[in-house]
Amino acid sequence: MSNKVRVRFAPSPTGGLHLGGVRTILYNYLFAHHHGGEFVLRIEDTDQNRYVEGAEQYIVDCLKWCGLIPDESPEKGGPYAPYRQSERKHLYYEYAQKLVDAGHAYYAFDTTNELENMRNQLRTDTNPNPQYDSNTRQQMRNSLSLPAEEVVDLLEKKTPYVIRIKMPQNQTVSFTDMIRGEIHFDTNLVDDKVLLKADGMPTYHLAVVVDDYLMKITHAFRGEEWLPSAPVHLLLWEYLGWKDNMPQWAHLPLILKPDGNGKLSKRDGDRLGFPVFAMDWKDPKTNDTTTGFKERGFLPEAFVNMLALLGWNDGTGQEIFSLDELVQKFSIDRVHKGGAKFDYEKAKWFNHQYIQHTADDKLLPLVKPYFEKEQIPIDDSYLQKVIGLIKERCTLLPDFVQQGRFFFVTPQHIDLPSIQAKWDEKKRQFFESWLAGLDGIGSWEHTAIEQHFNGVLDQHGLKKGDVLLPLRVMLVGGKFGPGVFIIAEMIGKAETALRITNVLSQL
RNA sequence: GGCCCUGUCGUCUAGUUUGGUUAGGACGGCGCACUUUCAAUGCGCUAACAUAGGUUCAAAUCCUAUCAGGGCCGCCA
């Protein structure tokens, strides 16, 4: 018997991939690799009404960007293919039927309207959400309440029906969650969930159990919002006779909105100005694009590192981990139980850390597109030097353009007021004579430039602090950037002279 | 409303199993230093055991109750 760890991420391809989803993927990946196991991507596309064009490819792209590549997936295949539930449709009926035969499930013929009527009629202040359960099932139209002949008749007439689980009465269903410990449920309070829909597709409840069994999943991670339906799944594993093969469950804490409380949603990101999806998601119906972490200028390594620490830590205080380190150190019992509010400031801090620790030549291809997008003419080796000079003041990739543009193009907007605040004739004369002597500088290199600059300074009886800021503003356009003589060296003698002359004429 | 989950600085968290810490770290904020601007860096400050009762010489840690927040209650996942 093989004990190989097998986990799966099972998204429904209905839109952008949420932060929480990526974290679930990450924990799956880390757990699998830590234990030398396998990580499976399974697409749960059993709801035909929610089918969204391109959503599956988008998920695959996100996984690739994050570097969390599954061992088995729809595109890659594997020994348990197909990995798309819509392509496994034919498998589920048999199991649903088995459950009916064993008396653990039943046919229900109620129409949508009838269900709605039942809920409306039974709704009271003390019971705002009436369920289809052991209390109400006898009043509904199903193979438990109807005479056997009528059921046969309805089936023969091809009346649409669903198959529901028959929740037992007076039982306590328990299991041990890997991060929460013992959890108990009273079966009287759980409803008869639909297992097989009228269109022949399974619901999540049936599909997750059947596929986890068929795919030999050993550990199942999912969000905490699934906890209430756990007893259904537990019972299904038991009724199908697979109890000994049931995976160990771990219900992950939720990622909460930064302000107030509640689950973090795409809307919160729009409202507060930060991404929630991993990558840009363009809704094919509305054509609206929601910004992703990737396009916002995050490094995938930073994004993944940040997510790993949102609910987990290794107990040492270390915060920066490579993916390999995470694989090595991750353990499910150090996952926090409580939900974590997402902190965008901290997320940016991680990215800043990663930019500092990434070599300039690795940064080059990541930064380059942002310059191209702004149609700034670039030379690779020059850009790489610039990157080295400005990286410490860049938090997100687009910051490089903001911080480095003046290395490539003459600034259009000059912060004149900053110069004018302390401007006088003496300073003008200094700049003019320095300009005139520029050709006297032996090699156009920052130490030589600075030396020459200091010499002229002495002749004019000025202090360095008097003219350095004006010089900076003339070359850069504003009060920012690395050492001013290095900037002069980089942009060249002619451009330096040009910028100074230009600004001088405006003063 | 019912059920389930959770509760340590503003935020992420260490510490809870095996009671004894000035309750530690990080982000943020504030201040200082450095400085040629912006950053970066270094240093410092800020700030928490949800509440109430127990048990105990001693409780963040064990027990009880309360409170608060969250999740779920679809032929969605």
Image (cartoon, coloured by chain):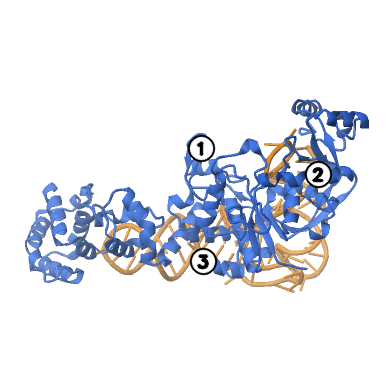
Chain colours: A blue, B orange
User: Could you tell me if the residues under marks 1 and 2 are in contact, i.e. CB atoms within 8 Å?
Assistant: no
Q: Give the alpha-carbon distance from disc 1 to disc 3, as whole Å.
A: 37 Å
Task: State the mark number for residue A96.
Answer: 2
Please report whichever mark, 1 or 2, sits nearer to the chain's N-terminal start.
Answer: 2
User: Could you tell me if the residues under marks 3 and 2 are in contact, i.e. CB atoms within 8 Å?
Assistant: no
Say which residue appears at 81% left-offset and 49% top-offset.
A236
Q: Picture coordinates of residue A468 (x, y %)? A: 20, 61
Task: State the mark number for residue A502.
Answer: none
Report the front residue among B31 and A354.
A354
Give the image quarter of residue B24.
Answer: bottom right
Amino acid identity at mark 2: Ala
Q: Chain of mark 1?
A: A
Q: Picture coordinates of residue A423 (x, y %)? A: 15, 53
Q: Which residue is mark 1?
A: A284
Q: Are marks 3 and 2 on the same chain?
A: yes
Q: Picture coordinates of residue A437 (x, y %)? A: 7, 64
Say which residue appears at 78% left-offset and 49% top-offset.
A233
Does residue A295 appear to the left or right of A70 in the view shown?
left
Please report whichever mark, 3 or 2, sits nearer to the chain's N-terminal start.
Answer: 2
Which numbered disc, 3 or 2, marks the residue closer to the eye?
Answer: 2
Identify the element where label 3 is drawn.
loop
Mark 3 neighbour class, 10 Å CA radius: few under 14, some 14 to 19, many 20 or more = some
Q: Are marks 1 and 2 on the same chain?
A: yes
Q: Which residue is mark 3?
A: A320
Identify the element where label 1 is drawn.
loop
Q: Quadrant of the N terminus of chain A?
A: bottom right
Which numbered disc, 1 or 3, marks the residue closer to the eye?
Answer: 1
Q: Chain of mark 2?
A: A
Give the image quarter of residue A494.
Answer: bottom left
Please report whichever mark, 1 or 3, sits nearer to the chain's N-terminal start.
Answer: 1
Mark 2 neighbour class, 10 Å CA radius: few under 14, some 14 to 19, many 20 or more = many
